[in-house]
Amino acid sequence: MESRDISEEEQFSEDRLAEAQEDDLPNQNRLDTREQKEFFALLARSGPIPDPNTLRQYETIVPGFAKQYLTSFVEESKHRRGMETEIIVLNKQELEQQGWLMRANHQRSLWGLAAGFIISISALGSAVYVTVKGYPWVGGIIGGATVTALAGVFVIGKFQEKQEMDAQLESQESKDKALKSLPDDINT
C-alpha cells in the first residue's frame, strides 16, 4: 500500500467513520468508505427507464426484455397523451356548449325583461286610466298588484339564480372529485 500524509481533520473524520461503523454494524461485514459511497450512489438512481447496465442484465436473464420494456413504455406514453388530448377536446366541447347555453339564457332573459316591461307599463297605465275614470279602489288594486308582482318576480328570480349557481358549483366540485379519484397515471 502506498503511504501518504493525512491531515488531522481527515484522520479525525476517518476515525469517526470507523467508530460509527463499529457501533452501528457490530455483527455485519463492513464496507470501506469508497464502497459505501458507490452503494449510496446506486440507490440515488431514479427514473422510469432503468440504466443501460440494468437493462443488459435483464436482457441476459429474459431475452427480448429490453425491447419489450421500452416498447411498452413508449405505448403507455402515447396512450397517456391520447387520453389528455381526449380530455382537452371534451372540455372544449363542454365549454362551447356552456357558451351556447349562456347566450340562449341571456337572450331569453332579455325577451323576458322586454315582455315584463310591456306588461308592467300596460298594467300601470290601466291602473291610472281606471283611477282617472273614477274608480280609485280598482286602480289601486291593479297598481298595487302590479308592483307586488314585479317585486316578487325579481326576488324569485334572484333566488332561482342563486340556486342555479350553487348547483353548478356543486356539479363542478363533483367533477373535480371524480378527476382526483382517477389513478395518477391518468391525471398526470
Image: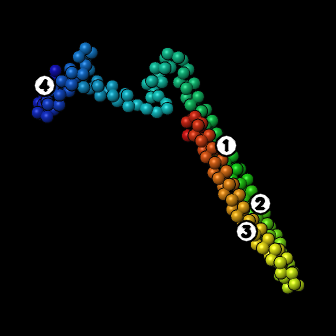
Image quadrant occupied by the C terminus: top right
Residue with the mark numbered 2: 104
Query: Which amino acid lies under the numbered mark 3 shown in the image of this protein?
Result: Ala
Marked residue nearer the N-terminal end (2 or 1): 1
Is 46 displayed left or right of 162 in the figure? left
Q: Is 167 left, or right, of 180 in this rendering?
A: right
The three-letter amino acid code for the residue at tag 2 is Ala
- Which mark is nearer the camera, 4 or 2? 2
Q: Which residue lies furthest to the front in this view?
A: 137
Of tags 1 and 3, which is closer to the observer? 3
9 to 111, vertically: above or below? above
Q: What element carries label 2?
A: helix
Residue bearing mark 3: 151
The amino acid pointed to by label 1 is Glu
Q: Circle 4 sits on which residue?
A: 3
Amino acid found under the numbered disc labelled 4:
Ser
Q: Which label's residue is closer to the chain start, 3 or 4? A: 4
Q: Which element carries disc 3, helix, strand or loop? A: helix
Q: Mark 1 points at which residue?
A: 86
Q: Spatial distance from mark 4 to mark 2, Cα to Cα?
A: 89 Å
Q: Can residue 114 be seen in this view?
A: no
- Determine whether 172 is above or below 181 in the image: below
